[in-house]
Amino acid sequence: MSIPGEGLAKGLAVTLKTMTRRSHTQQYPDVAPELPPRSRGVIALLAENCTVCMLCARECPDWCIYIDSHKEEVAVPGAARPRQRNVLDRFDIDFSLCMYCGICIEVCPFDALYWSPEFEYAEYDIRDLLHDKEHLGEWMATVPPPPAHDPNGEPAKEEAAARKAAAPPATDQPSSGPPNARRRPGSGSRTDEEPP
Ligand code: SF4
Ligand code: SF4
């Protein structure tokens, strides 16, 4: 059996409890919000890294990446024929269609696309949300640096390969072994100690 006025008392109790709580409202735009550094705000392009492989444009579910390029011949000293390379003419992203899935950034094999936490690029005209190569390049200045490597983690395979390439070549000349070492016939680089 309910007591008359019980609901009203409960409602007032909730109101009083809420009134004494600290407010979490942020007065944007007077106060800038504290966003996580890896927030998905806008996509930045490092055009020097782009090889015009078209993977990002093909994988974009919204088809909002537009790329144009032309081929250029580059003379390579010592090569019989000049090499061909793609030159990026146009790289546009239409942010009025983009759904910020990040697929383009993940599939790019050459680290040409990055997330920037910058989000203040609203426009009065929707056509201005088409950002061209130069505009996308300007966002690179707002891309945060990558997180530091885990000191206990395994080194990246690129690092291991670079270290291996920089190491002096292993030599299997008899002169580099112990003074009394000799090659075992048919045993490649293995050496045996001379018996005393
Ligand atoms: S974030 Fe997604 S929707 Fe936006 S351009 Fe990249 S792939 Fe397309
Ligand atoms: S996937 Fe990367 S390298 Fe390939 S076209 Fe897109 S941005 Fe350029």
Image (cartoon, helix red, strand yellow):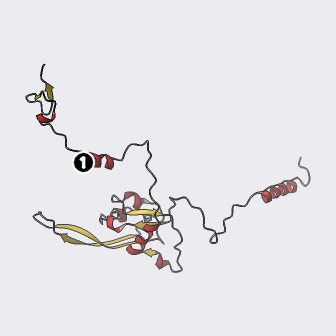
The reply to whether residue 60 is in sight is no
58 or 135, nearer to the observer: 135
Report ligand 2 position as a quadrant: bottom left
Name the residue at 89% across, 49% down. 2
Q: Which residue is mark 1?
A: 165
Per the image, label 1 sits on a secondary structure element best described as: helix
Name the residue at 47% across, 71% down. 95
Question: Looking at the picture, which amino acid does disc 1 mark?
Answer: Ala
Q: Quadrant of the C terminus?
A: top left
Q: Position of residue 55 (x, y in %)?
A: 33, 62
> Residue reaching furthest bottom?
125
Name the residue at 40% across, 57% down. 106
Q: Position of residue 173 (x, y in %)?
A: 12, 37
Placement of 169 over or under 54, stated as above or below: above
Q: Position of residue 130 (x, y in %)?
A: 44, 75
138 or 71, nearer to the observer: 138
